[in-house]
Image (cartoon, rainbow, N blue to C red):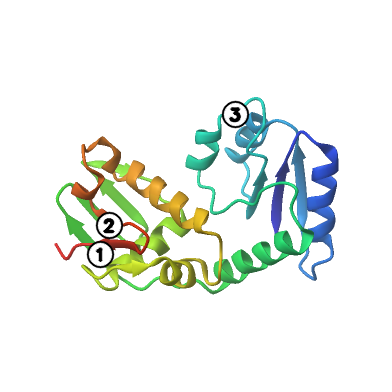
Amino acid sequence: MRIIICDDDPTQRDLARACLEVSAVQHEFTEFELGQDALDHLRSHDADLLFLDMGLPDIERLEVLTIGADDYITKPFEPIELMTRVEVFSRRAAGRRVERSTFTSEHILLDFDRMQAIVRNEKNDLNRTEWDVLKTLLSEPGVVAEYSTLKERAWGSTVSDAAVHMAIRRLRLKLKQDTLENEDDGLVKSHRGIGYSIDNY
C-alpha cells in the first residue's frame, strides 16, 4: 500500500509511520513537510492513502477538506484509532463492487459503472467515498438514509460524523448545489439530526 504522510512535525510523521509498520500489509511511505509538496507529488504519482495535517502553514483548511479527504482525526490521536481507521478503509477499498447503474435529474447525469458525473454539461470528478454515498442515497430514493446507515454502507464500518458531513459538503460543491439559495433545492436533501436523502426524480 502506497502511503503519503505530510506533517511539518517529524514526531507526528514518525508516529504515523510506526503505527502502520506494525501491520502485516506491506507499505511504501513517502513523507513531506509541506502540503503543497504532497499535492504536487500526487499529480504524477498514485497513492492509496494520504495523511495530511490540516494545520499546515501553506495550505488552507477548506482546501484540505475539498481535495477528497475521507475522514480526519484530531491531534493528539491514539495510535489504535489511526490503525483502526486505516484497516477500515483498506477493507473497503479491497472489497468494493459497484453494480451497473445510472441516474439522471435536471442538469445531472451519474454513471456508476463508469464513475462519471456530468453536471451542467461539465464532467466532475467524484472520489470513491462520494460515489458510495450517492449509491447509498439512491438505493431508496425519497427515503432518508440515517447517519448510521451511510457510515455502514459507504465506509464499511463506523467512522466519525465528520466523515459524513465532509463527504456531503464535497458532493454539494461538485454537484453545484452550493450555488443555490436553499441547499434543499438541490439533489441532496438535509434532514437535520437524522440524515440525508435524494428525491425520486
Q: If the image is split into quadrants, where does the N terminus sit?
A: bottom right
At 21% from the left and 37% from the top, the residue drawn is 181
Q: What is the distance, in whole Å, between disc 2 and disc 1 at their CAs?
A: 5 Å
Above/below status of 54 relative to 195? above
Judge by depth and name the residue closer to the eye, 200 or 190: 190
Above/below status of 169 relative to 9? below
Q: Mark 1 highlights which residue?
A: 102
Amino acid at the residue labelled 2: Leu
Q: Earlier in the sequence, mark 2 or mark 3?
A: 3
Q: Earlier in the sequence, mark 2 or mark 1?
A: 1
Amino acid at the residue labelled 3: Ile
Q: Say which quarter of the image contains residue 189.
A: bottom left
Q: What is the distance, in whole Å, between disc 2 and disc 3 at their CAs?
A: 31 Å
* Circle 2 crowding by C-alpha within 10 Å: few under 14, some 14–19, many from 20: some
* Circle 1 crowding by C-alpha within 10 Å: few under 14, some 14–19, many from 20: some
Q: Mark 3 highlights which residue?
A: 59
* Circle 3 crowding by C-alpha within 10 Å: few under 14, some 14–19, many from 20: some
Amino acid at the residue labelled 1: Thr
Residue 153 visible? The answer is yes
**Secondary structure under the numbered disc 2 in the rendered image:** strand
Determine which of the numbered discs, if any, sits on residue 19 in the image. none
Q: Earlier in the sequence, mark 1 or mark 3?
A: 3
At 52% from the left and 72% from the top, the residue drawn is 156
**Secondary structure under the numbered disc 3 in the rendered image:** loop
